[in-house]
């Protein structure tokens, strides 16, 4: 059963284009990059929302450090894909930094969207 993804942007794509694009998108953890849209996680479901590439202005990586449970002695890095679209910014959490780097490289090669912060 096919459930169409929800548009996070004001711009939307027709259902027949979305279905074909989501089916053949390149997958990076819970995210996907197709020819027409970036598919993101929505309410813990993989690739259930999308942002059309025509609405995206910039993407970049944000890294953070968090404290662990053992009296502040354990640290871990958190990595986020930050997407600017329609004048808004939204950060999506990645589990592995190498997958985040891979999707940023795919943005550089497949699209003309600026990667990195100005």
Image: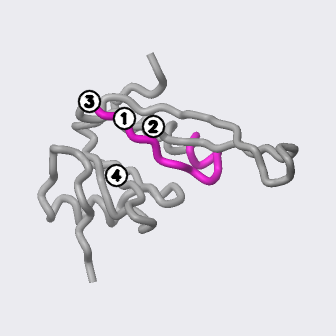
Would residue 54 be found to the left or right of residue 72 on screen? left
Chain-order first, disc 4 or disc 3: 4
Q: Earlier in the sequence, mark 2 or mark 1?
A: 2
| Mark drawn on residue 89 | 1
Residue closer to the observer: 72 or 60: 72
104 or 88, which lies in front? 88
Residue lying at the far top in this picture: please name it.
118
The residue lying at 53 percent from left, 34 percent from top is: 61
Q: Does the magenta stretch include residue 98?
A: yes
- Taking the image as shown, residue 3 lies to the left or right of residue 61, namely left
Which residue is the site of mark 3? 87
Cα–Cα gap, marks 4 and 2: 17 Å
SS state under label 1: strand
| Dot 3: element | loop
Task: Choose top left, top right, bottom left or bottom right for residue 109.
Answer: top left
Q: Mark 4 points at which residue?
A: 34
* Nearer the camera: disc 1 or disc 4: 1
Residue 96 falls left or right of residue 46: right
Which of the two marks, 4 or 2, is nearer to us in this view?
A: 2
Q: In this view, does 21 lie above or below 114?
A: below
- Which of marks 2 and 3 precedes in the sequence? 2
Magenta stretch bounds:
88-101
Residue 72 magenta-highlighted: no
C-beta proximity under 8 Å, tags 1 and 3: no
Res 1 → quadrant: bottom left
Residue corresponding to mark 2: 82
Compared with residue 58, is residue 103 higher up or lower down, i.e. above or below?
Answer: below
> Percent x, y for residue 38?
35, 49
Pointers 2 and 1 in contact (C-beta within 8 Å): yes
């Amino acid at each position: 059963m096919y459930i169409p993804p929800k548009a996070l942007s004001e711009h939307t794509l027709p259902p027949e284009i979305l279905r074909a694009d989501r089916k053949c998108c390149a997958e990076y953890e819970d995210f996907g990059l197709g020819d027409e849209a970036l598919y993101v996680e929505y309410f813990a479901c993989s690739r259930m929302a999308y942002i059309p590439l025509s609405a995206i202005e910039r993407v970049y990586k944000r890294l953070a450090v968090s404290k662990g449970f053992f009296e502040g002695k354990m640290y871990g890095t958190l990595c986020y894909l930050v997407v600017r679209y329609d004048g808004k910014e939204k950060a999506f959490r990645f589990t592995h930094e190498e997958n985040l780097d891979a999707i940023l490289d795919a943005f550089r090669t497949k699209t003309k969207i600026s990667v990195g912060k100005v």
